[in-house]
């Protein structure tokens, strides 16, 4: 029996609230911190790399739109959108970025497709789902750059800890011996969190669409729904894994970097129609957000960024809940603490931000694996159409950012299987557990 439910349950707690005004004190703190940084750098005549790029100059390459509305979901990895807007990286390239806080990934998808949002902080797999016409209306899409790698997690309810579940293997044992339905939540049917959850479960011999029930819950609502018993576990981005520990309702059984080190996660997504109509604006957005990614990845800048995005207008979570894992300080909530070198990365010398074709192709292979795609697409052709390496390369070169020479990369995932993009059809159809 297929136990997947792709719509949120009516019984779930709703925590969505109207857009709140920006916390002025946090914004002032952040601007003062930046002013101090630039002032000190100017005195030493060594401006940081993110400030070396020449300001945009008006001319034939002028952005067609003076203002762009970019959507985001309240997650730690929305930081590049917020920082680009708050620190003036956008103004350097002749645009004003207006961040727009959204309630759900379905809402982000719909608003990008219908043009209400010019672009958005989007789930990698969601962009490909829209491109392929699965999980919503078909629309040709473009990815301008990758926003981050790593930094998501799988959280289990404390009741499972009391039954001895501390790993995928012990979860499998419980499922085999307890005769009841277990429910797990992810954030969007074609998105990253669904794919990480499914891959992790399957790597321990648990079929994610037969052995458990899966439901869709917006990220900020995960903790509240776990508190009232709507699910046994979930996969989501930070800070909502750390928040479950903070609120004493759950614990981290795995991080997504456990599944795939330096995996692709969120992207700056938009429609192909937007890029075609406003190419200079698309390039300006890419430059501004690429510069923000580089700024955030400097460890010294992260505490101030955590303070900024913690505000009610953005993530709306305690600063300390965001900052810990944002700096690589991990605590799984059941006695293990460690410094994770594979914590959330936003730049990593351009290795994060480059839109590798193989990254996009991987999500298509998983869509095929789980029956979302009925037939194998032309994996490489689709990725070349969606991932705008040309726009990214132009933006990167103008910022002095190195561009990888190979649009494919190779990685070994948690089950020991290597993904390199060379034979996606065989890869997609080669898994023992699949639909």
Image (tube, grey):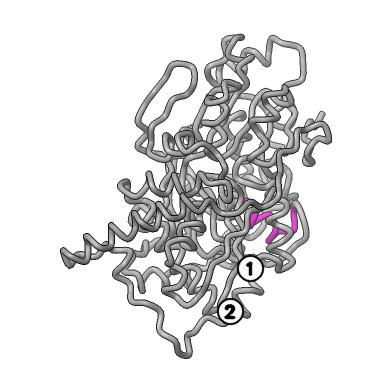
Residue 292 vertical placement versus 276 (above, below) = above
Question: Residue placed at 25% from the left, 63% from the top?
Answer: 39
> Any magenta on residue 90?
no
The mark found on residue 65 in the picture is 2
Residue occupying the point 69% across, 48% down? 104
Q: How far apart are the two marked residues, 1 and 2, measured between alpha carbons? A: 10 Å
Residue 127 occupies quadrant? bottom right
| Residue 222 image position (x, y, % from top left) | 66, 34
Mark 1 nearby-residue class (10 Å; few <14, some 14–19, many ≥20): many
Provide the residue span drawn in magenta.
125-134
Q: Is residue 368 left or right of residue 68?
A: right
Q: Position of residue 378 (x, y in %)?
A: 63, 60
Helix, strand or loop at label 1? It is: loop
Q: Is residue 132 magenta?
A: yes
85 versus 162 height, above or below: below
Residue 369 on image: x %, y %: 66, 42
Closer to the camera in the image, 399 or 390 = 399
């Amino acid at each position: 029996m297929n136990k997947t439910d792709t719509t949120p349950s009516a019984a779930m707690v709703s925590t969505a609230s109207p857009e709140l005004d920006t916390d002025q004190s946090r914004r002032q703190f952040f601007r003062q911190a930046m002013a101090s940084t630039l002032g000190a750098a100017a005195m030493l005549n060594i401006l940081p790399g993110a400030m070396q790029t020449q300001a945009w100059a008006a001319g034939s390459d002028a952005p067609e739109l003076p203002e762009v509305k970019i959507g985001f979901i309240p997650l730690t990895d929305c930081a590049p959108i917020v920082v680009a807007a708050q620190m003036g990286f956008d103004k350097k390239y002749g645009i004003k970025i207006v961040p727009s806080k959204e309630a759900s990934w379905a809402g982000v998808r719909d608003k990008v497709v219908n043009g209400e949002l010019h672009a958005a902080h989007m789930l990698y797999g969601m962009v490909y789902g829209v491109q392929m016409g699965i999980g919503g209306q078909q629309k040709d899409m473009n990815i301008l750059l990758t926003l981050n790698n790593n930094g998501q997690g799988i959280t289990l309810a404390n009741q499972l800890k009391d039954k001895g579940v501390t790993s995928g293997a012990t979860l499998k044992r419980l499922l085999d011996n307890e005769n009841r339905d277990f429910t797990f939540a992810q954030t969007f049917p074609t998105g990253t969190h669904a794919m990480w959850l499914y891959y992790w479960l399957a790597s321990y011999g648990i079929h994610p669409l037969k052995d458990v029930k899966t439901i869709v819950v917006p990220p900020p609502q995960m903790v509240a729904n776990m508190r009232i018993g709507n699910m046994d576990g979930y996969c989501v981005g930070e800070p909502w894994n750390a928040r479950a520990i903070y609120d004493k309702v759950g614990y981290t059984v795995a991080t997504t970097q456990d599944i795939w080190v330096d995996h692709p996660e969120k992207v700056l997504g938009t429609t192909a129609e937007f890029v075609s109509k406003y190419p200079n604006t698309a390039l300006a957005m890419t430059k501004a957000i690429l510069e923000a990614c580089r700024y955030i990845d400097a460890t010294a800048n992260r505490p101030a960024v955590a303070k900024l995005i913690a505000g009610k207008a953005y993530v709306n979570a305690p600063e300390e809940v965001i900052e810990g894992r944002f700096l690589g300080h991990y605590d799984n909530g059941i006695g293990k603490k460690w410094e994770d070198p594979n914590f959330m990365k936003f730049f990593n010398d351009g290795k994060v931000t480059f839109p590798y074709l193989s990254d996009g192709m991987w999500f298509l292979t998983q869509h095929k694996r789980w029956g979302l795609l009925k037939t194998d697409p032309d994996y490489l052709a689709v990725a070349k159409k969606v991932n705008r390496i040309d726009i990214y390369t132009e933006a990167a070169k103008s910022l002095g950012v190195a561009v990888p020479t190979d649009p494919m990369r190779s990685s070994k995932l948690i089950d020991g299987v290597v993904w390199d993009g060379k034979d996606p059809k065989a890869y997609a159809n080669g898994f023992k557990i699949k639909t």
